[in-house]
Image (spheres, helix red, strand yellow):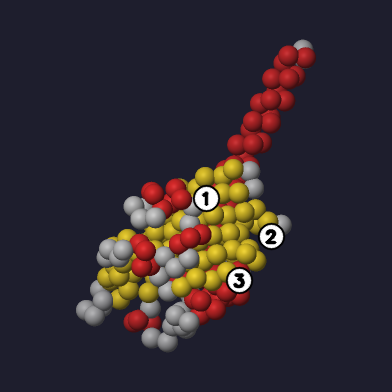
Amino acid sequence: MTDAASQDLHALVADMQARLRLAEDREDIWRLLMKMQDAIDGRDIKAYADNFTEDGVWAGVVGRGVGPAGVLETLGKYMHSVVDQSKRTFHATMDVVIDIDGDTATSTSKFQHIRHAEDNTTDVWHLGAYDDRLVRTSQGWKFTQRHAYVIVPYMEPKFQMVGAEDRPKEWTQRRGCKE
């Protein structure tokens, strides 16, 4: 094999390894998003909170928490064990876009919050969105920021984003929020 052919082969292998890592990272983040959905639907707030870094921020309409303990405390005020299955709600995550840059990533997605209606049918309670920032850790991908907010029914963003000062400016502009 010539030196040029050997260099081409090494470059091809390096490119394939980089593309494989990117695909694996996207899959790992996708699975983390589904793990978070399952934790919130199962009311396992500790499992949900454990997916944040020590300085990771969760912010949404019910409040703001920093680090696993803060997220657990904030969500624990509102999320309780399911006692009556007819009152149980579920989330369906969709329209996920994951962008990875080395050991950091961003993710945007929408979710439907579904509940049982009075006539025993299903009802979409609201449509919301997540804006996420993640970092690769020795334990896998974790959230450094997760902002959850309602899109439908419409709520003025400034009223539902506790901790909005932490949002990256491009998210504020993209979501039509006022500075």
What secondary structure is marked by label 1?
strand
Give percent across and percent down for residue 118: 24, 80
Q: Is residue 147 above or below residue 2?
A: below
Answer yes or no: do the residues labelled 3 and 1 have beta carbons within 8 Å?
no
Q: Indicate the amino acid at tag 2.
A: Gln
**Quarter where residue 141 is shown:** bottom right
Q: Is residue 23 above or below residue 132?
A: above
Residue at the (26%, 76%) spot, across then down: 117
Dot 3 surroundings within 10 Å: few (below 14), some, or many (20 or more)? many
Q: Which mark is residue 106?
A: 1
Horizontal relation, residue 153 to residue 26: left or right: left
- Label 2 or label 1, whichever lies nearer to me, is 1
Sequence-wise first label, 2 or 1: 1
In the image, farthest residue toward the front: 179
Cα–Cα span, label 2 and label 1: 18 Å
Which residue in the protein does label 2 denote?
139
Q: CA distance from mark 3 to mark 2?
A: 14 Å
Where residue 100 sits: x, y (%)?
56, 45
Would you place residue 106 above or below residue 51 in this image? above
Q: What's the amino acid at mark 3?
A: Pro
The residue wearing badge 3 is 68
Return the residue found at the far bottom: 83
